[in-house]
Amino acid sequence: MIAVRDYQPGDLEVLGEVMQSAIRQVAIRDYAPEQIAAWAGGRPRGALFVDHQVWVAEADGGAVGFIDLEPDGHIDHLFVHADAQGMGAAGALYAALEGEARRRGLGRLYVEASHTARRFFERQGFELQGRQSVQVDGVALDNWRMEKTL
């Protein structure tokens, strides 16, 4: 059973572990090893979440995923631990985010989705806006600009 709650400052370390697991064990099917190494070099930082609303998915009392929403409708992070894939954590997190976005009266949501996350966002009704390449520690990572009108 997945429960969704608001982020708490004490969550930061475990969210870093969730992110690392998602990148190193799940995204590896869509990215080359050097891309995974560059991407996995980052960790969520507390300052990052200052102006973002962040939700945490829990299963069996532990954090298994997180998603965040910036004030303008940008989704910067959605990660689910490799061991929690297929349990509905991403869907539960996204439902909380979209519900809040609608309550705020946001007209759209947008994201730069990884190859791995693209399929999830398409199922949520996001439309492709284009492919892009970003540099992370000198390594090119492709992702997809996507958006959804609310």
Image: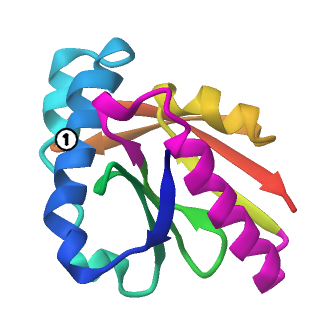
Residue 39 image offset from top left, x and y in percent: 23, 39
Total numbered circles: 1
Residue 94 image offset from top left, x and y in percent: 62, 54
Q: Quadrant of residue 74?
A: bottom right
Visible residue check, residue 20: yes
Q: Would you call the spot at circle 1 few (<14 residues within 10 Å), some (14-19), or many (20 or more)?
A: many
Q: Quadrant of the C terminus?
A: bottom right
Visible residue check, residue 43: no
Lateral position of residue 105 relative to residue 35, left or right: right
Looking at the image, residue 62 lies above or below residue 45? above
The magenta stretch spans residue 89: yes
Q: Quadrant of residue 134?
A: top left
The residue positioned 79% from the left and 65% from the top of the image is 108
Type of colouring? rainbow
Give the main secondary structure, helix, strand or loop, of the magenta stretch.
helix
The residue positioned 47% from the left and 79% from the top of the image is 52
The residue positioned 39% from the left and 45% from the top of the image is 79
The magenta stretch spans residue 92: yes
Q: Quadrant of residue 138?
A: top left
Looking at the image, residue 28 lies above or below residue 110? above
Residue nearest the viewer, comparing 91 with 44: 91
Q: Secondary structure at mark 1?
A: helix
Looking at the image, residue 75 lies above or below residue 7? above
Q: Amino acid at mark 1?
A: Gln
Residue 17 image offset from top left, x and y in percent: 17, 48
Lateral position of residue 132 relative to residue 16, left or right: right
Segment tinted magenta in the rendering: 79-107
Q: Return the residue at label 1.
A: 20
Residue 140 image offset from top left, x and y in percent: 30, 32
